[in-house]
Image (cartoon, helix red, strand yellow):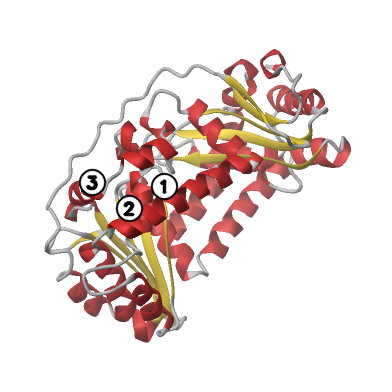
Amino acid sequence: MLEIKTLVNGIDLIMDPVNEVESVTLGIWVKTGAVNEDKKYAGISHFVEHMLFKGTETRTYLDIARDIDKIGGSINAFTGKEATCYHVKVMSSRLFDGAEVLCDMIENSVFPKKEMDKERFVIGEEIKMTLDSPEDLCHDLSTELIYNGNVLSKSIIGTPTSLKRITRNVMKDYVKKRYTKDNILVSIAGKFNEEEVISYFENRFLNLEEKSEDIEFENSEYRPKVKVVHKDVEQCNLCMGLPTFPMEDVRYYPMQVLNNILGGTMSSRLFRNIREERGLAYSVFSMVSGNKNLGYFKIYAGLNKDKVKDAIEGIREEIILLADNGISDDELIASKEQLKSGFVFSQESTASRMFNNGRMAFLMDRIVPIEEVISSYDKVTKSDVESLITLISDFSRYSAVAVTGNDELNLKKLF
């Protein structure tokens, strides 16, 4: 069973040995993201992530890239609502060469002002790219509506205005307060020597502050909202959703099974009805997501802009059928087998194992063994799934966003 081991220097370590491979994926996670940001500095966690690649006391941005290239590795990072992760994949024999680059970035980045100005512009272009992508914009706005009033509604990327406020001193102060020993977690999966890994990381991050100040999560009363964004596009991107529960909730596995049946696969009810039978959408699916304190359920469709009413009627029809008739034994079995297979397949990748372990550690404070995941899916009953249908069957509880070229669309009337 995998454990979260706290080293003598205060950082947490997860080791997942996979001796059948010759590679290793190392991730250094920092428990900081959009939820930890001051509104006026929205996007600072993501900005920091970009800047850690721009040079340290001994490496330029080009040195960072070259040092990874010359050992045949790949390096990247991402920022989420609740965490930031820097990761590298290398041959096992090059593990500590890759680790040295990541640790140097986290411990010794210098945030050059000239590079900050350039990267502020780059992120500004990233914001524009999101605004120019109707599907991305639709998902982002729907998440904001579902989580409206609590910290999970905060934007990861920020705004052009908030980015302008983030000076070098503001960034250095944020990193000092958030990149602390108690916020660092190292997740490693692949082929490696466990004693060597422990010895190496016990002697890193010694100059970081010991502790950070965590925010208290305060959930707000959910009130469904509808928003229409008019753009010069031929399609309508529709996203409707509502809040559910966190990843640790006992209903999380049954909710995944229900989601899979309704809109998670090419044999799902929504895909068959909206895509195959009615021909209203090229893309239609549902999804669930769990954070530490809350989660959501969403339905997305990319539609002909004149067929929104028909599509919503089709979605409503499928949900009513679920509420009236429940699910079949065959649907239950197929959904559970698909979910188990997807999880097992992910375990064949060292990168996926590293990501899964790090995410579980942050969101659940433990690593769920593979056997427990499989068993949890196996234990889901028809009544477990059907008890959740009422959660998603009331259309008046859905928040909805449409990004459309139809200026006459009255989305609120359809809900």
- Numbered badge on residue 174: 3
The reply to whether residue 249 is in sight is: no
The crowding category of the residue bearing disc 2, from other C-alpha atoms within 10 Å (few below 14, some 14 to 19, many at least 20), is many
Per the image, the residue denoted by label 2 is: 48
Q: Where is residue 100 in the image (x, y as percent from the top left)?
A: 27, 75
- Numbered badge on residue 80: 1
**Relative height, residue 66 to residue 124 (above, below):** below
**Relative height, residue 154 to residue 50 (above, below):** above
- Numbered disc 2: secondary structure: helix
Residue at image position (36%, 53%) is 117
Q: Which numbered disc, 3 or 1, marks the residue that appears first in the sequence?
A: 1
Type of the residue with mark 1: Gly
Dot 2 and dot 3 residues touching (CB under 8 Å): yes
The reply to whether residue 183 is in sight is: yes
Q: Which numbered disc, 2 or 1, marks the residue that appears first in the sequence?
A: 2
73 relative to 382 in the view: left or right = left
Q: How far apart are marks 2 and 3 (CA)?
A: 9 Å
Type of the residue with mark 2: Val
369 relative to 321 in the view: left or right = left
Q: Which quadrant of the structure image shows residue 198? A: bottom left
Residue at image position (36%, 80%) is 67
Q: In which quadrant is the C terminus drawn?
A: top right
The one of 410 and 83 positioned closer to us in this rendering? 410
Q: Which quadrant of the structure image shows residue 5? A: bottom left
Depth-wise, is mark 3 or mark 1 nearer the camera? 3
Q: In which quadrant is the N terminus drawn?
A: bottom left
Q: Position of residue 399 (x, y in %)?
A: 58, 23
The crowding category of the residue bearing disc 3, from other C-alpha atoms within 10 Å (few below 14, some 14 to 19, many at least 20), is some
Q: Which quadrant of the structure image shows residue 149? A: top left
